């Protein structure tokens, strides 16, 4: 009786080949894919990747198809990434050398995760937090490792109004991603403010930023 072993090299990329898979992110993704594959009886011989793609070498088992394997690995891992933003942030903040380490830690502690899932955007790589004041909700966008101002949207403290304004803000975030921050600022957004960072001294700059932020969270 003959013996056949089929090896398949799978490759998939980030959306629009955005270079967002940093070393820390890749490490977590590879670990999750291996654990998921083991649970589902999929043998992965090798997995690696770079900033914009993941590739792995698998051995097809009896009754397994390429389509099914791709759904179980790529589809599931994409879903896991989308559901794991807060864990992604935690992993990224293990590196205390990122420019806005202190600001992101502070915002993560105040994020209202029971109301809104933590969001991130790719260009520039940023996180969007929901903070709750006495009178308003505040959506705060902070970049990970680029020298950009903190962007804040102020919303009436009503969950239905928050849902309505999220649709508007999503369009504005798309404008920032596609056309740049200057185009967004020139559109004169309402109920919006920003905080410029002082990078001359890390500790002093964080304290000044925190004081300004707390003045605006009404």
Image (cartoon, rainbow, N blue to C red):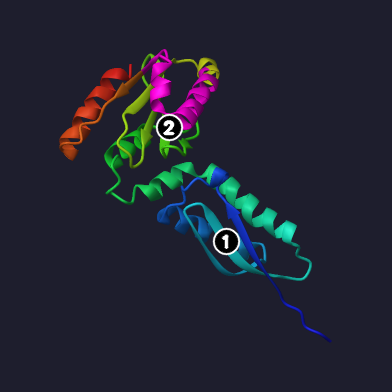
Residue 188 falls inside the magenta stretch: yes
Magenta stretch, overall SS: helix
Q: Nearer the viewer, mark 2 or mark 1?
A: 1
At 47% across and 53% down in the image, what residue appears?
Answer: 51
Q: Residues within 10 Å of mark 1 (few under 14, many from 20)?
A: some
Element type where label 1 sits in the image: strand
Question: What is the number of the mark on residue 55?
Answer: 1
Q: How much space separates mark 2 and mark 1, taking CA atoms?
A: 29 Å
Which numbered disc, 2 or 1, marks the residue that appears first in the sequence? 1
Q: Is residue 11 visible to us here? A: yes
| Disc sitting over residue 128 in the figure | 2
Estimate the x, y position of residue 54 in percent, counting from the top left.
55, 57
Give left or right: position of 97 versus 115.
left
Which quadrant, please, contains the N terminus? bottom right
Q: Position of residue 13 (x, y in %)?
A: 57, 51
Mark 2 burial class by Cα count in 10 Å: few <14, some 14-19, many 20+: many
Q: Quadrant of residue 64?
A: bottom right
């Amino acid at each position: 009786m003959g013996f056949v072993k089929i090896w398949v090299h799978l490759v998939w990329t980030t959306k629009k080949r955005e270079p967002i898979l940093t070393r820390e992110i890749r490490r977590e993704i590879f670990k999750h894919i291996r654990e998921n594959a083991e649970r589902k009886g999929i043998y992965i011989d090798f997995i690696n990747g770079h900033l914009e793609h993941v590739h792995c070498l698998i051995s097809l088992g009896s009754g397994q198809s390429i389509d099914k394997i791709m759904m179980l690995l790529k589809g599931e891992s994409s879903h896991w990434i989308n559901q794991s933003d807060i864990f992604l942030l935690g992993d990224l903040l293990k590196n205390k050398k990122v420019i806005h380490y202190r600001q992101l830690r502070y915002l993560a502690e105040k994020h209202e995760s029971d109301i809104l899932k933590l969001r991130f955007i790719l260009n520039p790589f940023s996180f969007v937090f929901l903070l709750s004041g006495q009178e308003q909700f505040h959506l705060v966008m902070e970049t990970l490792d680029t020298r950009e101002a903190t962007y804040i949207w102020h919303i009436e403290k009503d969950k239905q109004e928050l849902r309505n304004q999220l649709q508007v803000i999503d369009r504005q975030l798309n404008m920032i991603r596609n056309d740049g921050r200057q185009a967004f600022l020139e559109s004169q957004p309402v109920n919006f403010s920003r905080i410029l960072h002082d990078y001359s001294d890390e500790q002093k700059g964080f304290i000044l930023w925190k004081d300004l932020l707390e003045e605006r969270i009404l």
